[in-house]
Image: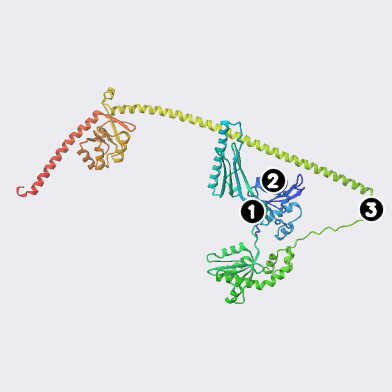
């Protein structure tokens, strides 16, 4: 059982009726807010209590009786529906048959007093220790309904048909959006649709999740509406905050395979478990989940260190045999029980023999324990804590307040002073009744004030929405101005492109005419087609961009690095002349020379470039060609001379006598 003293992860509300009744007009409540360390106290009306629950979303709303918050079961179901999804309503005194709060508080060591504020605090502290039952009326299944947001009825005709088709189409789109969100969240659901003209009239999703786990919210927007509602149970259900863990006798057989057996305090086998992989901490965790040990037993003497460590972690009593239990005795004692291996048998035997030794003691303690006390708690404290039954009962017994002694008086004649006192008391009672009426009026006015505050909040939300709309209009106006500026810039760029187009047209004329249509000042120009590098890719890119044809003047921006294949690719285009930046490789130079393609340095020609295209002076180009022709003639002569010398050398080598 948890006895947390540090701050809780969430806030707990403890609630008790301060005055009035939930069946009346205006009950007030003592409200305690508890976070594990600090406590805040307040007296609030029912309306304010519900508003604070909705605003602060506490983890638990704890009370000693849920019907102090609801007049009947229907009202309780309505209250549960209105609570935030993650807020639990907890009755700390039990389920359908609650115990007195004083008894529960005494059993768990929580301070208790009768004033409502003290009872509210006790409820909060008990809930913080996981004492009590969650009250629920709903399952973990949620229904999402997507339906029409308006009627499809009208005056008939084509307009009504289009209107109906539009609404059903909107419902279908909204249903698909919900379906997509549920799929993205990996939630299990069933979908049932009603198809109508143009789409769906409604779609219902049964989702296996709480509303807080569903990425869809209720809304109503134009043609569609989405409603979310949890599936209601047949009645009210009370579920313990933590699973009950009874007091047990534990038998343990440690080793490579560790086995654990649990018995209840009547000697019945509850569970047996064995593992080859779990360590001591995991074994302790398994025991914690299944019960609260009173006795921990082993089948050998002395008790193994592992078993002793587990026993100390629970402060349980120890049991070991006077000598190691023989196998035949273990087989006989466990003959009526089921087990999977010898380790489970040994653990079960240890627990059963330990129970046999304590059975009489358990019965004596149970016989002395009154029915209002938990037998297991008393047995545990007597056996493991070595306390007497009387001391334990005294510690658990609630200190009842002594009742006031009733006194009787013989009737007698009242004196004048006593009569006046009686008259004044009657007047005071009438005035107190009037004060109560005034308080009721104040309560009603406070509720009206709260309603007006809600209306004011709604008006402020509307004002904020309008402000957001105004900001959006301003943003759109700024966006419009930006687009206008971009349009002006685009128009200016378009004018520049128009000028460039005219220049390109002039280049095209130079490339596709005999210059008869070109003005006199341009008769000496010839188009030049640049190639970025002397590579296959660059040649093919230039050919794709503006075409490389026979008779073109080709400008190699970087002539280095080309081999025979690349040079042959360029030679196949049959250029008029190749202008180069940088030196050619010997292979490329030889290929171009063999194809009689003139090659010259680009520095000897004045080239004017416009983007990817260029022009050069015809006279400069002719000069480069003439220069190459002179060099080519000399190169041919040198080659012929070299060939002649080679022939002579070969002839002499074949006929040495005439050499």
Q: Position of residue 69 (x, y in %)?
A: 72, 49
Q: On the image, numbered disc 2 is attached to which residue?
A: 50
Q: Secondary structure at mark 1?
A: loop
Q: Earlier in the sequence, mark 1 or mark 3?
A: 1
Vertical side of 345 occupied by 504: above or below: above
Vertical side of 489 occupied by 452: above or below: below
Q: Position of residue 346 (x, y in %)?
A: 58, 72
In the figure, is residue 471 to the left or right of 634? right
Does residue 301 appear anywhere in the picture? Answer: no
Number of other residues with Cα within 10 Å of mark 1, as a class: few under 14, some 14 to 19, many 20 or more = some
Task: Residue at 41% x, 29% y: name it.
Answer: 493
- Within the image, what quadrant is residue 445 found in? top right
Q: Nearer the viewer, mark 2 or mark 1?
A: 2
Task: Residue at 13% x, 40% y: name it.
Answer: 640
Q: Earlier in the sequence, mark 2 or mark 1?
A: 1
The one nearer the camera, 639 or 284, is: 284
* Quadrant (top left/top right/bottom left/bottom right) for the N terminus: bottom right
* Mark sitting on residue 8: 1
Q: On the image, numbered disc 3 is attached to which residue?
A: 412
Task: Residue at 31% x, 40% y: name it.
Answer: 537
Q: Earlier in the sequence, mark 2 or mark 3?
A: 2
- Within the image, what quadrant is residue 51 found in? top right
Q: Position of residue 67 (x, y in %)?
A: 73, 51
């Amino acid at each position: 059982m948890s006895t947390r003293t540090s701050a809780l992860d969430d806030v707990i509300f403890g609630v008790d009726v301060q005055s009035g009744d939930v069946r009346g007009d205006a009950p007030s409540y003592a409200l305690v807010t508890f976070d594990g360390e600090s406590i805040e106290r307040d007296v609030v009306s029912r309306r304010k209590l519900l508003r604070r629950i909705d605003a602060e979303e506490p983890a638990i709303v704890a009370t000693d009786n849920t019907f102090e918050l609801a007049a009947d079961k229907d009202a309780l179901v309505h209250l549960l529906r209105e609570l935030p999804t993650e807020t639990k309503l907890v009755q700390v005194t039990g389920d359908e048959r609650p115990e007195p709060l004083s008894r529960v508080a005494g059993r768990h060591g929580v301070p208790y007093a009768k004033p409502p504020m003290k009872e509210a605090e006790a409820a909060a502290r008990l809930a913080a220790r996981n004492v009590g039952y969650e009250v629920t009326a709903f399952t973990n299944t949620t229904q999402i309904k997507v339906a029409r947001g308006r009627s499809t009825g009208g005056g008939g005709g084509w307009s009504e048909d289009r209107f109906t088709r539009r609404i059903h189409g909107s419902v279908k789109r909204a249903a698909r959006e919900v379906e997509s969100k549920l799929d993205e969240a990996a939630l299990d659901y069933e979908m049932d649709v009603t198809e109508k003209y143009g789409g769906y009239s409604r779609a219902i999703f049964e989702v296996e999740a709480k509303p807080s786990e569903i990425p869809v919210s209720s809304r109503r927007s134009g043609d569609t509406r989405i409603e979310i509602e949890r599936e209601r149970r047949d009645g009210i259900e009370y579920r313990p905050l933590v699973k009950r863990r009874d007091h047990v006798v534990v038998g343990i057989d440690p080793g490579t395979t560790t086995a654990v057996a649990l018995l209840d305090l009547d000697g019945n086998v509850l569970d047996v478990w064995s593992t080859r992989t779990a360590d001591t901490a995991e074994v302790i965790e398994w025991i914690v989940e299944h019960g609260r040990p009173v006795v921990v037993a082993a089948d050998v003497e002395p008790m193994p260190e592992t078993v002793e460590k587990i026993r100390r972690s629970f402060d349980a009593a120890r049991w070991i045999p006077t000598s190691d239990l023989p196998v035949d005795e273990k087989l006989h004692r466990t003959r009526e029980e089921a087990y999977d291996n010898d380790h489970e048998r040994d653990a079960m035997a240890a627990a059963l023999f330990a129970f046999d030794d304590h059975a009489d003691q358990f019965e004596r303690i149970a016989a002395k324990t009154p029915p209002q006390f938990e037998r297991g708690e008393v047995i545990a404290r007597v056996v493991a804590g070595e306390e007497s039954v009387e001391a334990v009962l005294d510690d658990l017994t609630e200190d009842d307040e002594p009742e006031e002694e009733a006194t009787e008086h013989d009737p007698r004649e009242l004196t004048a002073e006593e009569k006046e006192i009686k008259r004044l008391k009657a007047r005071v009672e009438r005035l107190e009744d009037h004060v109560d009426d005034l308080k009721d009026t104040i309560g009603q006015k406070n509720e009206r004030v709260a309603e007006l505050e809600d209306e004011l909040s709604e008006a402020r939300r509307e004002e904020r929405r309008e402000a957001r709309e105004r900001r959006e209009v301003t943003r759109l106006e700024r966006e419009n101005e930006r687009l206008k500026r971009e349009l002006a810039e685009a128009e200016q760029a378009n004018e520049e492109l128009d000028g460039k187009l005219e220049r390109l047209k002039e280049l095209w004329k130079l490339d596709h005419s005999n210059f008869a249509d070109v003005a006199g000042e341009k008769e000496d120009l010839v188009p030049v087609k640049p190639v970025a590098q002397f590579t296959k890719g660059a040649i093919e890119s230039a050919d794709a961009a503006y075409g490389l044809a026979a008779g073109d003047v080709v400008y190699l921006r970087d002539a280095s690095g080309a081999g025979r294949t690349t040079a042959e690719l360029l030679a196949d285009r049959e250029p008029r002349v190749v202008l180069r930046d940088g030196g050619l490789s010997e292979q490329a130079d030889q290929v171009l020379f063999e194809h009689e393609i003139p090659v010259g340095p680009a520095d000897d020609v004045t080239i004017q470039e416009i983007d990817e295209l260029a022009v050069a002076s015809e006279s400069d180009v002719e000069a480069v060609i003439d220069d190459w022709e002179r060099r080519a003639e000399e190169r041919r002569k040198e080659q012929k001379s070299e060939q002649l010398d080679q022939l002579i050398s070969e002839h002499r080598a074949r006929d040495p006598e005439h050499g």
